[in-house]
Amino acid sequence: MKTFHKIAGVVLALLLVAAAYGIFRTTPPAPVVTTANGIVVTSSHLTATPQNQLVDQTPLKIAQQLALLVTLPGERELAAEAIRLTDHEVDIAFNAALRDAALHPPALSAEAKVIQARLQKAERGLAATQAQIAQLNAAIAKASGDRKDSLEDQLDIANAQQELDQDEVDDAKQDLIRAGGDPQDRIQAMVNEHETSTKASEAALAGKPPEPTEERGLVHRATQWWELHKKQMLLWRAKAATANTIGTLSARHDALEKELETDKSKAGASADGTALSPAARLAWSDNDAEAVVNATKDRAARQKKLAGFDKRIDDEKELDGLYDKWIDLVRAQQQNVLNRSLRGIAIILAILLLGLFFDQWIASLLARTKLDRRQVETLRGVTRVSLQVVGVLFILLVIFGPPPNLGTFLGLAGAGLTVALKDFIVGFIGWFVLMGKNGIRLGDWVEINGVTGEVVELGMFHTVLLETGNWTDSGHPTGRRVTFTNSYAIEGHYFNFSTSGQWLWDELTVVLPAGHDPYPIVDAVKKKVVEATAESGRKAEREWKGAAKSADMSSLSAEPAINVRPAIGGTEIAVRYITNAHDRGQMRAKLNQVLVDLLGAKEAVPAPVPSK
């Protein structure tokens, strides 16, 4: 056992050193305030596929989703900056899309042309109704009497017609959008939705941040680390999407720039007609001038689009750096959580190591005391269980942390456990009773609830007996193990046939046939019994008198007693003597041999039988 404890102590010490090294490695540096001009850590880019849509709002959507996960100090500023950058980039994309839609309207399908004709007709009808309403309002201002009432009735009808015309225009616009014939309205609808979501995100970030709640315990630390890990993975995906967007925008920028350079080289100085030949100059017409104007406007629009690409790329690059800082912030918090987890593991290892040390120290301390074996075993068992209970409680506190509202929790938990575990609690308290001065120990011969046997196990909740048929025959067990809950020490009673010195009275019975004089045999038997039990008798008397608390108990005697009484078929001699419980079998065998020798081998004397 000592070797096992040494090995366990060495292993726990090594684990504790490893935990201390992990704590040192994961100790966070001094806190640094994260600003927009902070250090940007270069990270490897992942890949992401942009969505194929009219205006790509993916960067803004990602920033808004990440803003919902803000929990750490410093994340609010980063999330707000990410939304600002992505909102600016998406606004530029919307403006460019609106210009493209105005300069390059899509070719309408047959269905879209029909819807467009219906829309134009509805718009003309709405304009005519609005003009009529304006005329009626002007006429009503000048009219009076019955004519004014008539004009007001006409105005009511015109207002109702205006609502109908407006509904028809709106319906035609929606049909045209669904048919793909009005990209400007589609883009404008997306702009409105974008502005609404951005305002909601900014309002959420502008509110008062919730007070952070500190949850202790290794279980909560593991949960925090996993949540931070998932957030870090989302940030890496956002950074990958940003890198992919930068690549896409850069490719489109380069293609557009090359296209503009090609157009410039083709146009040259002939754009205004001054460098043309005389024949070409004669062919110059108004249509050509209009084409040149349109081409110039187109190049100007593409130049603005090129500048928009530059601004969007700059925003995305700044966003990429911001995600780097956000990832670093989450990583630092992860490291802090890991550090605290290692501290908790170190505390658990320290508790185990201290428990092992104190257990061995108490064992060595009790070994040097002058207490008897039973008292040493009692103190050893009580101290070991106490150390184990205290150690388990502290370890559970480190693993799960202190519960909120500790007083209320302990009260309710105590009441519930008292009802649910009543038998176990009583059994546990009974174990302390059994560990007392008048309790029982391993090897004692006891009777519990009518079952007699030898104590082979004495646990905190149960007592196990090796059953015997009769207490005087405890050296011959039946082979059955009987388990009792220790509550019998409080709610019931038990008999311990092993006293403090384990002295007990044993009895032998001999039947002499009729016609034999019993008294010579009685004298001889008494002499032999006194000789055999003299030493044990003196020890028993000394212990009894030392433990006696009353004068009436001081007259106890351990002298053997012999009773002669008539029996069927002869005379019965009963010999009672004191003996040690552990030596009872040997003493009985010795006295049986003495009786056989006294009675003579030639006499048909029945062998002595034990009393019942």
Image: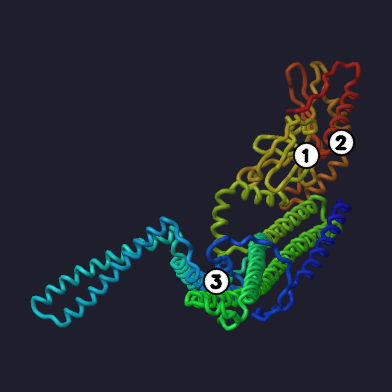
Q: Which mark is residue 281?
A: none
Q: Amino acid at mark 3?
A: Ala
The three-letter amino acid code for the residue at tag 1 is Leu
Question: Which sits in the foreground, 401 or 529?
Answer: 401
Looking at the image, which residue is at 71% across and 76% down? 40
Classify mark 3: helix, strand or loop.
helix
Identify the image quadrant of residue 468.
top right
Judge depth for marks 2 and 1 and give the one in front.
Answer: 1
Does residue 126 appear left or right of residue 498 in this picture? left
Residue hosting label 1: 504
Q: Position of residue 190 (x, y in %)?
A: 47, 67
Pick whichever of labels 3 and 2 is earlier in the sequence. Answer: 3
**In 3D space, how far apart are the residues under numbered discs 1 and 3 (Cα atoms)?**
104 Å
The residue to which callout 2 is attached is 530
Q: Dot 3 surroundings within 10 Å: few (below 14), some, or many (20 or more)? A: many
Question: In the image shown, does 106 or 346 lie closer to the viewer?
Answer: 106
Q: Is mark 1 in CB contact (under 8 Å) with mark 3?
A: no
Q: CA distance from mark 3 to mark 2?
A: 118 Å
Q: Hey, what amino acid is under mark 2?
A: Val
Mark 2 residue element: helix
> What residue appears at the point 69 percent right and 41 percent down from the top-left corner?
495
Dot 1 or dot 3, earlier in sequence: 3
Q: Is residue 220 left or right of residue 286?
A: right
